[in-house]
Image (cartoon, rainbow, N blue to C red):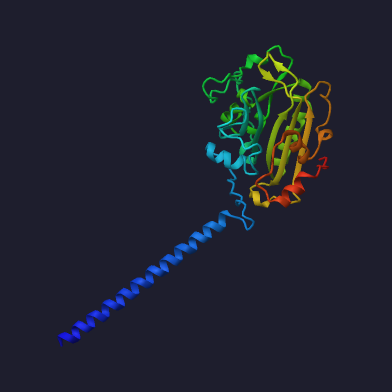
């Protein structure tokens, strides 16, 4: 009887060991499968990174803002290691700042229903230096433009951030300003800003890059005066993911001279292609999109007039 009991116990232990081994094997396969699923979620078949999901509401942190506003790509690979291509991020827009020129190279943001409203321009005068710049860098002040004959021209406009006073106030940082002629700033540039906001009222989110290039002197030997201001906007149905952007998406690209005499000009006369702007600036504006979509969007000129 003792021998039978001993044999029975050994058989039971062997069966238990087999069951444990099978469970471990099944669990490992399940984890491997999950790992493979996660990998496929972030990598496209062509090996390029998968486009990240983009929150539809207003960003609640600089990290989320960078994810949202640079969803199409970082045009100049701006970072905090290059003083003339220095990445500055807040909750409301992202920009590349040029220390030596004392102006931004470009700014990126999105207009959506969550980011526009009816808040008035902040008072008192909200223009101010940007204290986020590294210690030892010269800081442009509002008075640096006084008597220059140039406006303190926003790249990311305050009205695009009228959903809150805090957001609007952020756009008056001097790192968001470039010297613009009054005719450009209050003429076709402003008209395009207003038009892009109408696209939001028609049910779109609008992803925007704006920037400058060229130099024709300096204000008070400190602030570079660009020869041209450019802007690129992509409209998608409100709330749509970036992956919804295809070859048929509407793209508006303009390149405007920073000159006098154009106050009454319509913004449409300055339409061009994204590819031409890339050639003039050296930037890669849609680097996160598939190559075939980039090629289609970057080579067509917008022709819609309403």
Closer to the camera in the image, 178 or 86? 86
Q: How many marks?
A: 0
Q: Residue at x 84, y 28 (%)?
A: 265
Q: Residue at x 83, y 40 (%)?
A: 305
Q: Quadrant of residue 159?
A: top right
Q: Residue at x 38, y 72 (%)?
A: 22
Q: Position of residue 216 (x, y in %)?
A: 75, 20
Closer to the camera in the image, 128 or 37? 37
Q: Position of residue 44 (x, y in %)?
A: 61, 56
Task: Tell me the quarter of the image containing the C terminus.
Answer: top right
248 above or below 278?
below
175 above or below 291?
above
Task: Tell me the quarter of the image containing the N terminus.
Answer: bottom left
Residue 162 located left or right of residue 217:
left
Q: Quadrant of residue 95?
A: top right
Q: Position of residue 287 (x, y in %)?
A: 67, 44
Closer to the camera in the image, 147 or 306? 147
Q: Quadrant of residue 23?
A: bottom left
Residue 126 located left or right of residue 197:
left
154 above or below 59?
above
Q: Can residue 58 be seen at all in this image of the molecule?
A: no
Q: Can residue 146 be seen at all in this image of the molecule?
A: yes
């Amino acid at each position: 009887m003792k021998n039978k009991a001993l044999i029975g116990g050994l058989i039971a232990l062997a069966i238990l060991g087999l069951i444990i081994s099978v469970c471990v094997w099944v669990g490992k396969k399940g984890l491997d499968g999950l790992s493979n699923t996660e990998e496929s979620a972030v990598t496209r078949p062509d090996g390029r990174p998968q486009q990240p999901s983009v929150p539809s509401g207003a960003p609640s942190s600089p990290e989320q803002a960078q994810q949202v506003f640079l969803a199409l790509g970082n045009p100049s690979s701006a970072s905090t290691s290059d003083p003339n291509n220095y990445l500055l991020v807040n909750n409301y827009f992202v920009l590349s700042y040029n220390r030596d020129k004392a102006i931004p190279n470009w700014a990126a943001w999105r207009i959506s229903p969550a980011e526009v409203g009816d808040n008035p321009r902040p008072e008192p005068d909200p223009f101010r230096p940007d204290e986020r710049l590294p210690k030892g860098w010269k800081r442009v002040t509002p008075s640096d433009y006084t008597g220059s004959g140039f406006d303190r021209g926003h790249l990311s406009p305050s009205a695009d951030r009228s959903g809150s006073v805090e957001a609007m106030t952020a756009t008056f940082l001097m790192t968001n300003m470039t010297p613009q002629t009054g005719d450009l700033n209050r003429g076709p540039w402003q008209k395009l800003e207003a038009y892009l906001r109408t696209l939001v009222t028609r049910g779109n989110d609008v992803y925007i890059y704006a920037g400058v290039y060229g130099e024709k002197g300096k204000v008070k030997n400190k602030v570079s005066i660009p020869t041209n201001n450019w802007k690129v906007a992509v409209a998608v149905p409100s709330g749509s993911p970036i992956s919804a952007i295809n070859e048929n998406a509407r793209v508006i690209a303009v390149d405007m001279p920073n000159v006098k005499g154009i106050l009454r000009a319509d913004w449409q006369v300055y339409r061009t292609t994204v590819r031409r702007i890339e050639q003039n600036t050296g930037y890669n504006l849609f680097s996160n999109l598939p190559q075939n979509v980039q090629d289609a969007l970057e080579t067509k000129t917008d022709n819609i007039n309403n």
